[in-house]
Image (cartoon, grey):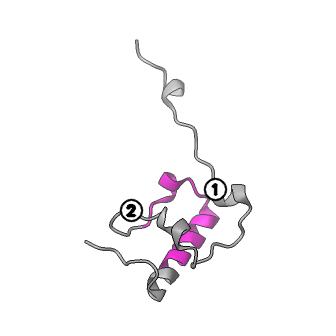
Amino acid sequence: MRQSMAARRKKKKRCQWCMEGIRYIDYKSISRLQRFLDSKGKIFPRRQTGNCARHQRQLAIAIKRARIMGLLPFVVY
């Protein structure tokens, strides 16, 4: 028997930055930033990470700053 759409629907992810009460994402926290990068160094999209729009923008800026400082790799093909 087929499951209804409501039964298969996944629970929406919550923004972990909002849940922890973090207002500013620091570019020096490399271990936290690496969780939002794939194996090639690309930034995961918001729908995949569950971040809110505000924190996704801050995250992208922090990752880009860390790349320029040499803390994180640029995109590898």
- Is residue 58 shown in magenta? yes
Q: Residue at x 71, y 58 (%)?
A: 20
User: Where does the magenta region start and end?
Assistant: 43-64
Q: Residue furthest bottom?
A: 69
Pick the residue in front: 21 or 57.
Answer: 21
Distance between the Cα atoms at labels 1 and 2?
18 Å
Q: Residue at x 48, y 63 (%)?
A: 36
Residue 19 lies left or right of residue 60; in this view the side is right
Amino acid type indicated by mark 2: Asp
Quadrant in the picture for the N terminus: top left
Q: Residue furthest left?
A: 77
Element class at badge 2: loop
- Is residue 12 shown in magenta? no
Residue 66 x/y as whole percent = 50, 81
Residue 49 x/y as whole percent = 52, 55
Residue matched to label 2? 38
Q: Residue at x 44, y 85 (%)?
A: 70
Decide: is 28 above or below 46: below
Pick the residue in front: 12 or 27.
Answer: 27
Q: Which mark is residue 16?
A: 1
State which quadrant residue 18 falls in. Answer: bottom right
Q: Residue furthest front?
A: 31
Structural crowding at the residue carrying mark 2, measured as other residues with C-alpha within 10 Å and reported as few (<14), some (14–19) or many (≥20): few
Decide: is 38 above or below 6: below
Q: How many marks?
A: 2
